[in-house]
Image (cartoon, rainbow, N blue to C red):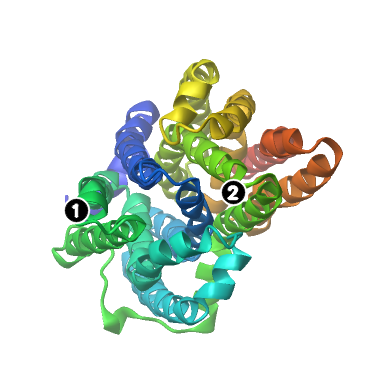
Amino acid sequence: MNRSEAQFKKMTETPIPRLVISLGIPTVISMLVTNIYNMADTFFVGQLDNTSASAAVGVVFGYMAVIQAIGFMFGQGAGSIISRMLGAKEEKEASKVASTAFFLALSVGATLGITSMILRKPLLHLLGSSDTIYPFAKDYIKFIMAAAPITMGSFVLNNILRYEGKASLAMIGLCTGSIINIGLDPIFMFVLDMGIAGAGFATALSQCISFSLLLFMFLRGKTQCKLKVREIYLRLSLILDIVTTGFPAFIRQGLTSISTMVLNRIAGGYGDPAIAAMSIVNRLAFFMFAVGLGLGQGYQPVCGFNYGAKKYDRVKEAFRFTLVVNEIVLGCFAVVGFFIAPEAVSWFRNDPEVIKIGKVALRFACGALFLQPLTVMSNMTFQSTGQKLLASFTAMLRSGLYFIPIIAISESLVGLRGIQFAQPLADVLSFATVVPLIIYFFRNIDKEKTS
């Protein structure tokens, strides 16, 4: 049995709990380590004893979300198509998709990086920077901008590996760079006295290391898909297929960026402590959800592979199993996070005003954490099975269709409290919206199975 046949057998015959856990654990580790290194910047910058510097990290997070949005669009778009192609045993076509998405991401990333360097000042103000935050934000973001093509390419490589069912290889690449970043932050910031610029440089350098390791996996033949210039297939139909399949990821990540800008601008009316507090809460809430998201990303290749192989019972079983595990794990996180909210915020900024604002927002976020698994897993299911319209619509809910009008209205009605509960309320409405959609989807594949 060759490598491709062995991988097909693994993805379509391994018992679902063991398969999802085996693919999910490396992804969970990757997500946790990546979020620890994201929070490392927030933590170490918080040691500079300047609230505006802490707020600058939250401002730049909006730009990083744009890079992620485009990277995930190409990566998850290609990955979803690839997993279904491999499930249908179309390996050569899968390599064309992988090569096309990878080189497109590098080109788009380079264009974005150069353009944003030229327009850095107006861009930072658009992202929500105040005049006091700007000097710190510009020093931090310049290295992030320079590394944009590498970062974008890394997202594509990581997603292709995951969708092939090689989550462990993806974990090695991401975690190594992340761990190095955590170690470099204090060296560049304090030992070499680079300040907040050192945090940005450490982040950019770690991205280059991750990219090199991920690319090495492909060049050494450890993957089914091959990355070769001659495999690039610049046909409009393929590019549109990649982009439209990955568009839900772009919407999700892009709206995260837009919602961060909106949040920073509205919170800015209450001073830099409010921006810093909400930035910290967003990082903490996402860190808790990273476990659920990691398990969900372990589920995605199982879903796509078996959907492509027309093994619909395994798709349903994988969905149910992953959802139950996510609810249990996130429920535990939510309870702990609720009770230690003040202490958790103070880890990143020991400022009484920041803690006062942040602890309330974090408790609201923990209360809504129970609802997120179904919402996100439904979106992942639609994307992994090529349901482009459903995937795009559900991707727009949490950070876009619901959050942006909610925060605008609630802040005008109840002030700062409206900012603190806006995202949790958006989670409640998103959950209520996806329930009938996911029921409809599984009823449809039941009909397809029996027809």
Residue 104, by quadrant, is: bottom left
Disc 2 residue type?
Phe
Amino acid type at circle 1 is Arg
Residue in the image at 69% along x and 44% along y: 270
Q: Residue at x 56, y 38 (%)?
A: 277
Q: Within 10 angstroms of label 2, few (less than 14), some, or many (20 or more) residues?
A: many
Q: Position of residue 301 (x, y in %)?
A: 41, 47
Number of labelled discs?
2
Looking at this view, is 126 or 115 the one in front? 126
Whole-angstrom CA distance, mark 2 to mark 1, is 28 Å
Residue 206: image quadrant is bottom left
Q: Which residue is mark 1?
A: 3
Q: Nearer the viewer, residue 233 or 337?
A: 337
Q: Secondary structure at mark 2?
A: helix
- Note whether 3 is above or below 277 in the view shown: below
Q: Is residue 69 left or right of residue 94?
A: right
Is 361 rendered above or below residue 263? above
Foreground disc of the pair 2, 1? 2
Location of residue 86 in the rendering, given as x and y in whole percent from the top left corner: 36, 57
- Local SS, label 1: helix
- Rendering coords of residue 155 (x, y %): 38, 60
Residue pictured at 60% horizontal, 60% vertical: 130
Left or right: 52 with respect to 259?
left
The dot on residue 393 is none
Q: Which residue is mark 2?
A: 382
